Amino acid sequence: MSDYEEATSFLGEWGRFQQQVFFLLCLTVVPNGFTALSMVFVADTPLHRCVVPPRVNLTAAWRNSSIPLEEDGGGELVPSKCLRYKLDDLLSFSERGLVPGVDVNLSEVPKEGCLDGWDYDQSLYTSTIITEWNMVCDDRWKNPLTSSVFFSGVLAGSIISGQLSDRYGRKIVLFVTLAFKTVFALIKAVSPSWPVFCALYFVVGMGHISNYVSAFVLGTEILGPRVRTIFSTMGVSLFFGFGYMLLPLVGFFIRDWRMLILALNLPGLICLPFWWFIPESPRWLLSQGRVEEAEAIVRDAARRNKIEPPPVIFSPLQNKRQSEERTTHNICDLLRSRNICGISLTLWLVWNSLTIGYFALSLNTANLHGNAYFNCFLSAVVELPAYTLSWVLFRWVSRRLSIFSTLSMGGLSLLFIQLVPANLIPVAITLEMMGKFAVSTAFAIVYAYTAEVYPTVLRNTAIGACSMASRLGSIMAPYFIYLRSYSVSLPYILMGSLMTLAGLLSLLLPESYGMPLPETITHMQPFPGCCQKTPYTATHTEEDEEISSEKKNPVVT
């Protein structure tokens, strides 16, 4: 047990105070499920073909034959999405009374691009940003780039939010970025052009990751060991998954992309009043030497839990040691020593592989066989048992074994997809959902493990840095899906290989199961291959005995 946990153990694990913090922080994460994956519907590409203007006086036979046929990925002939026969030639044939396919060999007729725009199928969507700004054919590269711009914003937010949170506090960064994200997301709904949409989406990405990480770290530091495990694995993840589940339900009833964005982001405003009910992290306040504020929060928590606090919560000697240990830390400290550098680099690679797998599989739901809304809902539903399993594994199984087994399962499931015959579509979808289940489980465990392995003085910065490193994977994820246009199995081969490799790398990480949260860098567990030290188990030193003695016989000054 660490000094902080020992000092606050009188609060209990699951009183009214802990329940309020747990559920309110989880609720702030629900809108993130909307934001991260709304592009599945906002930027989906419906069926389309070149427009043949009514002003062109063609016979019915020539108008019906104005679009050439080409093979799709399954070898079937379908109307071209980007070409039409040259209208001047068709008009000449039509005026001369020639019959297509009889008097004229269509394979010899010259083709041209969609000079008059496109006709879009509106059976699924009234409008998307694809239909709004014609992001098809020569401009189809804008589709994956749009998602990558959002994840670039997440990368930028990861760089700055962790350091801001460690410097100015978890609570203020949580609510400032939550308001920031919600306001810019609502403005995004009235974007007049694609560049403006992308600029706003970049800012939304910055707020998205900042408020998620701040809420995650705040709950990890306030809640006790048992509840912390539930919160960091199953709690925030289930509420994120709940938001993800609502996305296809809302999208099913709102088919216009502008109205859909408004509907998905207005709930973010409901979370802002939580400011008055969620406290700052007492651990962070202690690390900054603000002992009186930390004690005030703990005493208020005791009052809510109807518990009488001791006269002295944080003893003078303990406060003095906290003050002596207080130094300014930044992202460079994650690479300063050989031990923390090894842990950081390994975790960055694992996080990167996870984000590629998670977001590529999530964004791919619109490409699966069947209804896009049902596939998205199915992809969200498999996350719920995944997050429940993550809590079970985190509670009773070692961290390294949990991460290795889930990553390996996900990687192998995706690699097996290429072996499934084309006519067994349900089997292929089942394997993809197994991969999504495994990567979701691993993601929840890795998030919680990262919060466990790093010390309080660097925890928010470390999670932000891991998230920052992983954003390279999320930026690339849309292009993994883009590879489907060249080979349907190629994305699965790449994702499966990366996840399997990440599972093997995770075996290098130090074990944190059953260990207290480290408070300083010297308390961290050793990385294999580095100079071994005695693991941090909060063993009592003479100084600790003096602190313990003061707690048993407090002197009121």
Image: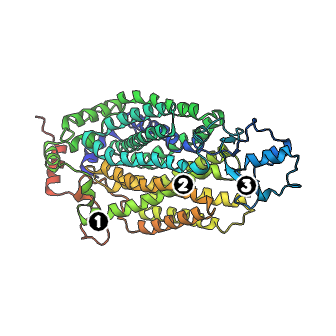
The disc labelled 3 sits on which kind of residue? Pro
State if disc 3 and disc 2 touch (CB < 8 Å).
no
Q: Is residue 495 visible?
A: yes
The amino acid pointed to by label 1 is Pro
Q: Is residue 389 visible?
A: no
Q: Earlier in the sequence, mark 1 or mark 2?
A: 2
Nearer the observer, 156 or 61: 61
In the picture provided, is 427 more to the left or to the right than 201? right
Q: Residues within 10 Å of mark 2 (few under 14, many from 20)?
A: many
Residue receiving disc 2: 360
Q: Label 3: how many residues lie within 10 Å, few (<14), some (14-19) or many (20+)?
A: few
Residue in the image at 19% along x and 48% along y: 328
Check disc 2 and report its element: helix, strand or loop. helix
The mark lying in front, picked from 1 and 2, is 2
Q: Which label belongs to residue 110?
A: 3
Q: Position of residue 352 (x, y in %)?
A: 43, 58
Secondary element type, mark 3: loop
State the mark number for residue 526. 1
> Residue 486, how many percent across, how many down?
61, 62
The residue tagged with tag 1: helix, strand or loop? loop
